[in-house]
Image (spheres, helix red, strand yellow):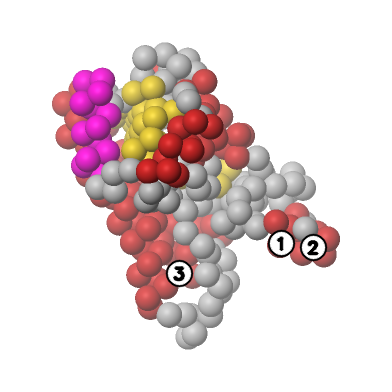
Amino acid sequence: MLRGRIALVTNVEHFVGLPAAVELAAQGAWVLCHDKSFTQSAAALAFAERYPELLVSQCQDPAELVAAAVTAHGRLDIVVSNDAFPAIRAAVDQARLEDLRGGLEEMVVAPFALAQAAAPQLKQQRAGKLLFVTSAAPFHGLANYSMYVAARAATNALARSLALELAPFEIQVNAVAPNFVESPTYFPPALMDDPETRRKILKNIPLGRLGRPDEAAALIAFLASDRSDFITGHVMPFAGGWA
């Protein structure tokens, strides 16, 4: 259980952010949620009404997000960098560098900046959990998706490096690496509703189905708990046996 823990989850309306935030709250954590889509106060208010157990921040600066959590409760125990970006299909000789830069900004620079902002507080406490939601794609590579795979691989490597760097401070750093998980970003209904397309996708998954976001959230909650204190530096595939 996570009773009394203070957590921060980014991009909560995307990928597995919301299920993770809800699961952390269900286990007793105070959860501060962030999302770039909360550009209007009405969006944040609607979210708050739907999920009263979660708090919403419209801050875009990582340092401000960390400060908001620390100001409210004096500490920060769990940081979940939940990052998503469309996997753009393009052969290397046809790829646009602006798409590569966009992916790197969202999937590498953003989580690095969040870790940079949170590290001083976690080091001062000599305790904390830093979790990156990435992808299992780098385990195999994906033809024509080199931009996406390269960006995800960078953040997987970031998790391993930060685990070594922060271990002396009793901070555990891990990455949850999904693939084939239900998500409008990667598997929109228009794609999955086509029987032939769905068959082609599912045949790649040994378990024969897409993973559920709440299943990914359960893994994130475990890694955020005391039960994972001896686990650090791991990139954990969550891909139904594909990786």
Q: For marks 1 and 3, give the one nearer the viewer.
A: 1
Principal SS element in the magenta part? helix
The x, y position of residue 213, in whole percent, is 60, 40
At label 2, counting other C-alpha atoms closer than 10 Å, the crowd grade (few under 14, some 14-19, many 20 or more) is few
Residue for point 21% across, 42% down = 63
What is the span of residues highlighted in magenta in the rendered image? 62-75
Q: Is residue 153 left or right of residue 216?
A: left
Q: Which mark is residue 194?
A: 2
At label 3, counting other C-alpha atoms closer than 10 Å, the crowd grade (few under 14, some 14-19, many 20 or more) is many
Residue 144 occupies quadrant:
bottom right
The CA span between labels 3 and 2 is 26 Å
The CA span between labels 1 and 2 is 7 Å
The CA span between labels 1 and 3 is 24 Å
Residue 66 occupies quadrant:
top left
Residue for point 44% across, 28% down = 54
Name the residue carrying label 3: 147
1 and 2 marks in contact (CB < 8 Å): yes
Q: Is residue 199 above or below residue 60?
A: below
Q: Nearer the viewer, residue 169 or 34?
A: 34
* Secondary-structure class at tag 2: loop
- The residue furthest front is 42
Residue for point 53% across, 32% down = 50
Who comes first in sequence, dot 3 or dot 2?
3
Residue 192 is one of the magenta-drawn residues = no
The x, y position of residue 207, in whole percent, is 74, 44
Q: Nearer the viewer, residue 222 or 197?
A: 197
Name the residue carrying label 1: 190
Residue type at the position of mark 1:
Ala
* Secondary-structure class at tag 1: helix
Residue for point 64% across, 57% down = 187
Residue type at the position of mark 3:
Met
Q: For marks 3 and 2, give the one nearer the viewer.
A: 2
